[in-house]
Amino acid sequence: MTNHRINPKANKGQGLIEAILIFPVLLAFITILFFAAYRSLVYFYADAALHEAMICTDSKSLSLCEKEFKSHIQKVLLNKETPELRLSQRGSGKRYTLHGEVKIQNQILIRKEMKFPLKGNL
């Protein structure tokens, strides 16, 4: 066996170079993670706000509920994104079906259907 000596000066600065090379990859990963978390937050918040707007129509007008939805959803939207909300009612009287749809920047689409009267409101 031969005994090879390792030159300690040959590895000098290797850790710094590796850190510099991995930094952009790490930064890109963190950016993608934040973007995904933001989109998830918007999706779940819009879903909850749509649900509340649909329940709101049981006691208030459609236009008032749409305004309340837009005021709630603007709290989490950035860059002046504008949500499109459509609420449509099918049927009349005490028994009807409400269809709701939210579209945000052609990236998020949520559709719901709710039948009225809700339990307990017979």
Image (cartoon, rainbow, N blue to C red):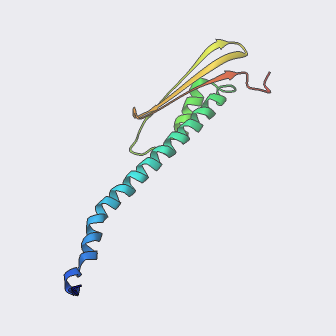
Q: Residue at x 63, y 34 (%)?
A: 52
Q: Residue at x 62, y 28 (%)?
A: 54
| Snapshot quadrant of residue 121 | top right
Q: How far across and down, in percent of the image, does residue 62 sit?
A: 59, 24
Look at the image and tell me whether residue 87 can be seen.
Answer: yes
Image spot of residue 18 (x, y percent): 27, 70
Location of the N terminus by quadrant is bottom left
In the rendered image, the quadrant that contains the C terminus is top right
- Residue at 80% x, 27% y: name it: 120
Q: Quadrant of residue 65?
A: top right
Number of dots carrying numbers:
0
In this view, the residue farthest toward the top is: 92
- Nearer to me, 31 or 25: 25
> On the picture, is 22 further left or further right than 80?
left
Is 37 or 49 nearer to us in this picture? 37
Q: Residue furthest front?
A: 1
The x, y position of residue 37, in whole percent, is 47, 49
Name above or below for residue 11 compared with residue 78. below
Image height check: is 20 above or below 83?
Answer: below
Front one among 75 and 122: 122
Quick check: can you spot residue 75? no
